[in-house]
């Protein structure tokens, strides 16, 4: 039977030699199988806090549900990260990213920036130690992603380069815990509904509103972490490390004292009335304050938030993490904290001390119960982060055939080391497939050419929608590139830049844009000036020599009117062979643009907007349709046209009003005449955008 299992090598994952990666394998590499009952376990043995690197297979005992299992494969892996970030190659598509995540010897890290529970000064203080840690931690095959409480786990993009992470940490005071007045409209409505009372209630939002906001923040954070853990569970069996930058949580319990007065009834439907000024039906909102909301909405949220039990949700998070083989490495960026609350909050000292203990203990519990390391209560953040690097840089990978049943249940794993004085942290268990799932996994799948084409279409849609993941967070400048061919067979490249809507750019600024080869040779340059109040620019490039299909780079350096240089971007792209096209020019018209058409590099639109996209092409006509994020055509008509510029560029355009659409991701598909793929090139061109609430 065992020989028969080994004979199924065709179903095994065959890993390439690691001579070109940051992983040093200290033995001949084994083949790790993928049969339904084959389980891989990563093991982290330490002595006196340091990794133990000289153990052999015979030194381990492995038990599943209390029964000894025979270790079939054994390997020690040591990570030696390389300093050259440019040598790392990022996945280019969603499919490549998923394949990279499935590599059992590549480590996966997620940097979770708990903005709601980190102060602005603390977020700045942690930047350099954290960047140094990432430089020392990430190997050439490793993947790292960034997530915040406001993101969906589906929006996390994984890369091998740490450039984006460094940019976020270096440029932003991303922590929001100490912001006195909230930015979120829902939370602003709490401040309006529950005004500050008499002293000592002197905080701008009032104690009651602040309590509701704190509960909402903690709930959103724990929900986001649970969403992340479940997402990672479905991506790979091997260990996932979640480096969580947070000052901890109070873990709110249900509070009867916080409940609204229900003597006049439980909050239900909003009051319906007539606005005396306009004569229109109203639901009780204050027309002079769009953030005020109706009292019923505030009381409804107050009732829901008063009943949350974050202690229970926290325990569920720990269980989910153990089932997903995800380990947390929490870091408190405050260092050695003395007080938890700001002095103007007038919190009694004993209450403040209790809250501080609760926050620190929550981080310790998170690490202890998921086999991670907590960096708390220390001003030496660099040394604490170094412990994380050490902990994650050496481990053993074991494999065994489970003797348990294929019952769809969780099976506990226990790993012991026979050598005295060695502590072991390892995967705590796995969720076994059912017999039916196992049969489906091992079945030979036969597809027709039509099915293969349909699958390829779905992957194309996924890749297009995947480009929207970066729009879950704000950045100083966004750049959108379009590249393609003109009817005379010459190539063109265009770029749209958009700076952030911050005070830094209100007075305008300048941007220098350079088109270059990937080796750094300059092909063309452009300069864009932003007048006060203008946030976007559009430029086109005319190279001295004709461009051919291949890889290029676009470098954008921006300066605000004060002369500062807050942002430099380097974007690599590939010009497809003629007559293919890459990207599009996005145009917005709506209330946010003063009902004028403006180019944009922010692909987030509101339902009150109209979107027009322009794709360079050679076809004399444009045919387009609107798809949902799964590729299903929608019965929403598009207005299509072609436009010819003086330089010979032909633009295929599609326009649609977004009022009928719900908040979601969408794709505009361009095709050529008579159903022939070629409206914008040899293949269809997919242009993705996002509708936000």
Image: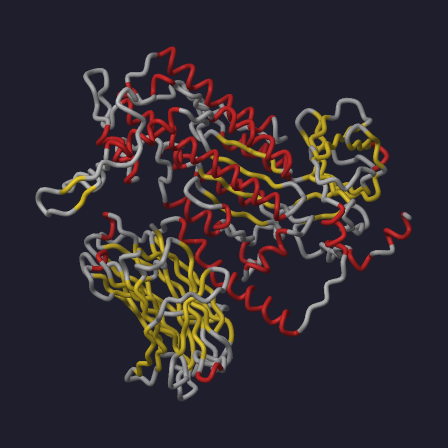
User: Which residue is farthest bottom?
Assistant: 488
Q: Is residue 353 left or right of residue 280?
A: right
Q: Residue at x 37, y 68 (%)?
A: 514
| Count of marks placed on residues | 0
Asked if 48 appears above or below 87 in the picture, the reply is above
Colour approach in the figure: secondary structure
- Side of 55 where 582 appears, left or right: left
Q: Single out the residue that lies furthest toward the left.
A: 277
Residue 613 screen position, x and y as percent: 35, 69
> Residue 678: image x %, image y %?
47, 81
Query: Please, is residue 548 above or below residue 610 in the view?
Result: below
Q: Position of residue 644 (x, y in %)?
A: 31, 83
Q: Quadrant of residue 660?
A: bottom left
Residue drawn at 36 percent across, 51 percent down: 475
Left or right: 420 in relation to 112: right
Q: At 35% from the left edge and 27% from the top edge, which residue is drawn?
A: 303
Up/down of 292 relative to 358, above or below? below
Asked which quadrant contains residue 395, the reply is top right
Instruction: From the viewer's perspective, tell me whether residue 666 is left or right of residue 328.
Output: left
From the viewer's side, name the closer residue of 490 and 180. Answer: 180
Q: Position of residue 615 (x, y in %)?
A: 38, 74
In front here: 269 or 42? 269
Q: Nearer the viewer, residue 8 or 397?
A: 8
481, 691: nearer the viewer: 691
In the rendered view, tell whether residue 43 sits above or below residue 667.
above
Q: Quadrant of residue 329?
A: top right
């Amino acid at each position: 039977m065992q020989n028969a299992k080994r004979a199924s090598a065709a179903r095994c994952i065959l890993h390439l030699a690691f001579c070109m990666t940051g992983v040093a394998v200290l033995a001949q590499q084994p083949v790790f199988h993928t049969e339904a009952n084959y389980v891989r376990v990563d093991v982290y043995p330490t002595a006196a806090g340091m990794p133990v690197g000289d153990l052999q297979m015979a030194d381990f005992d492995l038990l599943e549900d209390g029964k000894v299992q025979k270790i079939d494969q054994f390997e020690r892996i040591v990570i030696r990260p390389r300093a050259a970030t440019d040598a790392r190659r990022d996945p280019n598509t969603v499919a490549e990213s998923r394949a990279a995540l499935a590599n059992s010897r590549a480590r996966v890290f997620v940097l979770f920036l708990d903005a709601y529970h980190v102060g602005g000064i603390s977020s700045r203080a942690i930047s350099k130690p954290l960047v140094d840690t990432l430089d020392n931690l990430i190997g050439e095959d490793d993947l790292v992603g960034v997530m915040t409480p406001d993101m969906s786990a589906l929006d996390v993009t994984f890369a091998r380069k740490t450039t984006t992470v460094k940019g976020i940490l270096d440029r932003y005071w991303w922590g929001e815990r100490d912001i006195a007045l909230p930015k979120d409209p829902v939370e602003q409505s709490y401040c309006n509904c529950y005004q500050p009372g008499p002293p000592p209630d002197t905080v701008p939002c009032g104690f009651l509103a602040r309590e509701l906001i704190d509960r909402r923040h903690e709930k959103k954070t724990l929900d986001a972490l649970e969403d992340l853990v479940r997402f990672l569970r479905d991506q790979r069996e091997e260990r996932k490390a979640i480096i969580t930058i947070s000052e901890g949580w109070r873990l709110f319990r249900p509070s009867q004292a916080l409940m609204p007065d229900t003597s006049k009834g439980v909050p239900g439907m909003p009051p319906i009335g007539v606005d005396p000024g306009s004569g229109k039906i109203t639901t009780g909102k204050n027309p002079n304050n769009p953030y005020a909301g109706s009292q019923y909405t505030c009381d409804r949220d107050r009732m829901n938030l008063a009943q949350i039990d974050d202690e229970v949700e926290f325990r569920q998070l720990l269980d989910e993490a153990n089932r997903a083989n995800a380990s947390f490495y929490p870091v408190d960026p405050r260092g050695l904290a003395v007080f938890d609350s700001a002095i103007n909050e007038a919190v009694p000292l004993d209450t403040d001390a209790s809250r501080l203990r609760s926050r620190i203990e929550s981080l310790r519990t998170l690490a202890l119960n998921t086999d991670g390391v907590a960096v708390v209560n220390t001003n030496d953040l660099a040394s604490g982060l170094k412990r994380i690097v050490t902990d994650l840089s050496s481990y053993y990978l074991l494999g065994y055939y489970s003797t348990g049943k294929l019952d769809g249940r969780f099976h506990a794993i226990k790993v012991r080391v026979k050598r005295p004085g060695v502590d072991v942290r390892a995967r705590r268990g796995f969720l076994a497939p059912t017999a039916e799932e196992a049969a489906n996994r091992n079945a030979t799948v036969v597809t027709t050419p039509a099915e293969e084409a349909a699958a390829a279409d779905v992957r194309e849609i996924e890749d297009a929608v995947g480009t929207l993941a970066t729009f879950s967070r704000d950045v100083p400048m966004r750049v959108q590139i379009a590249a393609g061919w003109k009817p005379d067979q010459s190539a063109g490249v265009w770029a749209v830049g958009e700076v952030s809507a911050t005070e830094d750019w209100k007075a305008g600024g300048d941007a220098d844009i350079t088109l270059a080869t990937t080796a750094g040779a300059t092909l063309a340059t452009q300069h864009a000036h932003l007048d006060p109040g203008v946030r976007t620019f559009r430029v086109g490039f005319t190279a001295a020599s004709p461009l051919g299909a291949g890889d290029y780079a676009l470098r954008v350096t921006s300066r605000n009117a004060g002369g500062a240089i807050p942002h430099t971007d380097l974007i690599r792209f590939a010009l497809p062979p003629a007559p293919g096209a890459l990207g599009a020019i996005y145009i917005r018209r709506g209330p946010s643009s003063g009902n004028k058409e403006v180019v944009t590099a922010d692909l987030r639109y509101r339902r009150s907007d109209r979107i027009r996209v322009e794709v360079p092409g050679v076809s004399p006509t444009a045919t387009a349709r609107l798809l949902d994020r799964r590729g299903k055509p929608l019965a929403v008509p598009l207005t299509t046209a072609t436009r010819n510029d003086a330089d010979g560029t032909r633009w295929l355009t599609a326009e649609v009003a977004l009022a009928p659409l719900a908040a979601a991701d969408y794709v505009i598909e361009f095709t050529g005449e008579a159903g022939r793929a070629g409206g914008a090139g040899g293949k269809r061109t997919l242009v993705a955008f996002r509708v936000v609430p």
